[in-house]
Image (tube, rainbow, N blue to C red):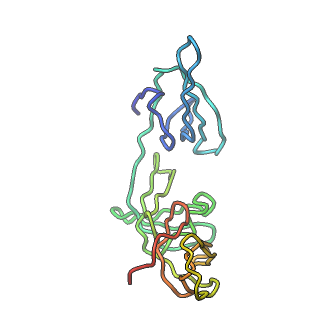
Amino acid sequence: MAKVNSITLRAGMVVEFNNKIMIVLKHEIMQMQQRSGTIQLDLRDIRTGNKDSIRFKTGEMVDRVRLDQNDATFLYEEGDNYVFMDSKTYEQTMISKEFLGEKGLYLQENMEVQIESYEGEPLSVELPMSITATITETEPVVKGQTAASSYKPAMLDNGVRVMVPPHIEAGTRIVVKTEDGTYMERAKD
């Protein structure tokens, strides 16, 4: 573990504090009149999920945890888990659907992901920036409806609801951002 200045911490970084491995959710620098500044951190314990707010003095050192990053391939769902295979060791890892949350909806067979872990325990799964999916249902195209700013709801084959331009029909393959589920473009087949 490396000691880092608390002012350099950002959301997503992992630190050890009070013998707990915690991820930084929010980082805010608070400046008080005629006093040195403080750093307000909102942290979540990786193992228990408990949240905590902690203040550090400017310049105070914190232990930053180095995470292992492994490339993996999504294989399949098994009960309440997703199964991934490490691209180098071919070792399989099960990660709960609850842990992945909404991200799990974007998983596709043989999708390449990056798993961050600490001492063999997965902490996060990073998906590709976008996926290609097929629209299963949407409202029909209305002739003359060409307003550029109007969008209509559509359902994808993975069960995700997205907003698409009015000219997009059911059966169309589109590219969707995995970060927020927004329509990017029509897929180039």
Q: Is residue 26 left or right of residue 91?
A: right
Instruction: Give the residue at x 59% y 25%.
Output: 55
Figure quadrant of the N terminus: top left
Q: In this rendered view, identify the residue nearer to me: 183 or 10.
A: 183
Q: Tell me which corner region of the image, top left, top right, bottom left or bottom right, holds residue 71.
A: bottom left
Find residue 15 and report its horizontal and vertical position in percent. 50, 36
- In the picture, the quarter occupied by the C terminus is bottom left
How many callouts does the rendering have? 0
- Left of 114 or right of it: where is 124? right
Q: Position of residue 18 (x, y in %)?
A: 57, 29
Q: Residue at x 58, y 78 (%)?
A: 156
Image coordinates for residue 23, horizontal then vertical, percent: 54, 41
Tell me: residue 121, above or below residue 160.
above
Q: Is residue 5 above or below residue 136?
A: above
Q: Residue at x 58, y 14 (%)?
A: 33
Q: Is residue 148 left or right of residue 115?
A: right
Rendered location of residue 85, percent (x, y): 43, 66
Residue 14 vertical position relative to residue 139 in the rendered view, above or below: above
Q: Residue at x 48, y 38 (%)?
A: 10
Horizontal side of 154 relative to 61 (left or right) equals right
- The residue sitting at the left extreme is 88
Q: Is residue 123 above or below residue 91?
A: above
Task: Classify residue 128 by image quadrant.
Answer: bottom left
Q: 107 or 11: nearer the eye?
A: 11
Between 46 and 186, the residue placed more toward the observer is 186
